[in-house]
Amino acid sequence: MEALRIQVAGCRKCALAEKRTNAVFGSGSAGSRLMFVGEAPGYHEDQQGVPFVGRAGNLLEKLLARIGLTRGEVYIANVLKCRPPDNRDPLIEEIQLCRTFLEEQVSIISPLVICTLGNFATKLLTGRAEGISRVHGQPQEMPDREGTKLFPVYHPAAALYTPANLKALEADFDLLPSLLGETKAQPSLEADTKNDDAVIELKQGQPEPEQLGLF
Ligand code: URA
């Protein structure tokens, strides 16, 4: 994994390399049976070189706590390793150039379950065009990878903006322990993911400046 990290840090395959502060390789336990795949780094991830450290990451941590896990116990990566300007959507060419890094991460980790966060990770790894609102919460076999299930869920950033998506995300997360063949841990009070602060803040029209988009 370290050799791959070094390759990603030096990657100049696309123009995103020119503007990045840090490539964001992935973090967590490479021995985990559960892997999460998001879309691309946002402002905070680019600054710190770590995936999901902004508000979407904060919600992801709360969702993990809900099922008795910490981010150190799972592996977290993204489809793109570098931040697209202004958090725009990844381009098809960028995804095609970057996908081998994710594929190698998946091969090394060999997880039981890959939870795809949002449309880009879901479409890339399922190889299908169905969007997240149609397929979320439905486990499926990963193409060409026996023994690994894909489990699409909404992107946490989409749940920050829409309470109905948050409900769906929580319900889908609650299915993860049984997918992993475990009993659900009791959620702690801190693990409450209602995330009222975020919703109230957005209602007041004061989203975090750098995270106006899906990040
Ligand atoms: N959104 C993502 O998809 N990935 C990150 O690392 C942060 C926000």
Image: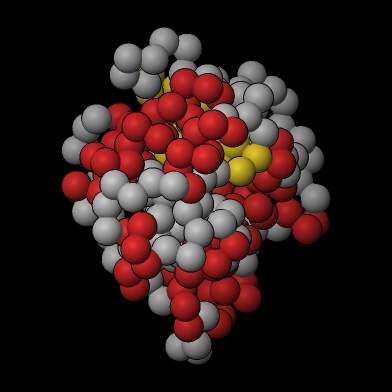
Q: Is residue 54 left or right of residue 39?
A: right
Quarter that holds the N terminus: top right
Q: Position of residue 146 (x, y in %)?
A: 41, 10
User: How many badges with numbers are in the image?
Assistant: 0
Q: Is residue 190 left or right of residue 60?
A: right
Of all residues, the one furthest to the top in this rendering is: 146
Q: Position of residue 200 (x, y in %)?
A: 56, 80
Residue in the foreground of this view, choosing between 163 and 67: 67
**What residue is at 42 percent from the left and 63 percent from the top?**
20
Q: Is residue 117 above or below residue 87?
A: above
Q: Is residue 80 above or below residue 42?
A: above
Residue 168 visible in the picture: no
Q: Is residue 50 above or below residue 147?
A: below
Q: Is residue 84 left or right of residue 198?
A: left
**What residue is at 47 percent from the left and 21 percent from the top?**
107
Q: Position of residue 6 (x, y in %)?
A: 52, 40
Residue in the foreground of this view, choosing between 25 and 162: 25
**What residue is at 54 percent from the left and 31 percent from the top?**
3
The image quadrant of residue 182 is top right
Q: Position of residue 78 (x, y in %)?
A: 44, 46
